[in-house]
Amino acid sequence: MNLNWFKYSSPASFYPFAGKLLPWFFWPTVLLTVAGLYWGFFQTPDVLTDQKEYYRIIFIHVPAAWMSMWLYIVIAGWSLVGLIMNTRLSYMMAAATAPTGAIFTFIALWTGAFWGKTSWGTWWDWDPRMTSELILLFIYMGYMALQAAIDDKRRADKASAILALVGVFMIPLIYWSINCPDPYQCTALHQRSSIKDIESNILWAMLTMTLAFWLYSFYVIFKRVRNIILEREKHTDWVNQLPEIQSVKGGS
Amino acid sequence: MMLAMKTVVHRDLILAMRRKTEVLTTLFFFIIVISLFPLGIGSEKQMLMKIAPGVVWVAALLASMLALERLFASDYEDGTLEQMLLMPQSVFILVLGKVIAHWLLTGLPLVLIAPLVGLQYQLPDAAVSSMMLSLLVGTPVLSLIGAIGAALTLGVRGGGILLSLLILPLYIPVLIYGSGAIEASMLAGASAEPYLMLMAAFAIVAVVFAPWATGAALKIAVE
């Protein structure tokens, strides 16, 4: 069988394909979010070690933090593909991913502040993980700002791709330096997390929410990339012949 | 290859000597920022010694960042940069040469002025020497990482403020270990050496990778 891997690398063929996929991401997102939140709020113990009800913020906080980091890797991955293969769609995917990643970073910080207030008694502490997440937000902001500042789209794509790759190289270094300001010892306020220590009920609810957030990311990113495609390809025939464009033009 | 680099360094130094103000501006910016902190925070000796490491490094970060804007800008505007990229030698050499010249003009003066900061903040001699050493190892890293940002924002609207948004987060490791080195030298039983070693490692990695990324960014900018 001869698979054509590049068939969907053209915006013209990816646009309808992404459109067809949208409902397949939308409904599972809704189902998993409802199921995960129900599970998390009503089927898990009310007290976790020394923490009361408020520990349930974990079902939003941890998945959001995971997605914020994962989506940055996704951006770097698309940037790398874009620079190597010179495919426009890869850059569009990277550009479409950034806002979602930044929003998840913000959610992780915000819910973290609430959790910190209830469990540590402070909204903000310069704990390594919190600081790294804040720096990640700055890096997302820089990425999006660079993309917005350059008028020439080709240059904006490539320049922000380089920035994303520099960032993915630097982030572990930044994380490590924040974690270990003294080369001899590393400290952290967050408890050392290890998945096997968490009660399986809580863990599964958390993983369900992570999957829900992941599918949500797919949904939003595909929707956003479709808009980017329309915007950038508006001069082409195939865009003008799309029924949704025709109907708008006919109506006006 | 070495000749090409030497020529680039030499040229940039001559150009800078014709317009000395730019070099002096960076240096005075550094001194002014450092002098402002005791005015805002208070000038008790204990307090000054406590804040000195962080203040020196934050001021160094800002000073080196301000100077970065000029790194490629004037060559980009008059088309020289495009000609330079056509050189038979690799872009790596060109970038490294320009960064070296830039560091000699903006990083080295900070190292040399450090004893003055020591006087202002009443630091012990050990702290002054480790401040000089940490600036000596750390400022080249700032110039190298900053060059990537300078190349990415070349000719972009609002480039200066954008540059700070891109680059300052990437400066964090240098800030942490730079101020850590000065702090360690003031504590009994602590040594600045591991901090300086780590920064030297950063410098080596930066010399290898940063000019390469900067070169790629420059090629995109003049495309």
Image: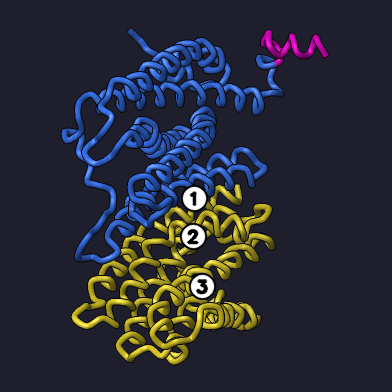
Disc 2 vs disc 1: which is toward the camera? 1
Is there CB contact under 8 Å for labels 3 and 2?
no
Q: Residues within 10 Å of mark 2 (few under 14, many from 20)?
A: many
Residue at the spot 64% in from the left edge and 60% down from the top edge: B76
Amino acid under disc 2? Leu
Query: What is the residue that sits farthest to the left in this orientation?
Result: A196
**What's the CA distance linking mark 2 and mark 1?**
9 Å
Identify whether A161 is placed above or below B74: above
User: Which of B29 and A210 lies nearest the eye of the viewer?
Assistant: A210
Taking depth in this image into account, of A168 and B203 the one nearest to the observer is A168
Which quadrant of the view contains residue A115? top left
Tell which subunit mark 1 falls on: A
Output the letter for the chain in yellow.
Answer: B
- Main SS, magenta region, reads helix
> Which residue has dot 2 on it?
B168
**At label 3, which amino acid type do we have?**
His
User: Secondary structure beneath disc 3?
Assistant: helix
Locate residue A72 relative to residue B39 in the image: left or right. left
| Residue corresponding to mark 3 | B102
| Residue A112 drawn at (x, y percent) | 40, 43
Q: Chain of mark 3?
A: B
Residue A138: which disc? 1
Magenta highlight range: A240-252
Mark 1 neighbour class, 10 Å CA radius: few under 14, some 14 to 19, many 20 or more: some
Give me the chain that's blue. A
Indicate the secondary structure of the residue bearing disc 1.
helix
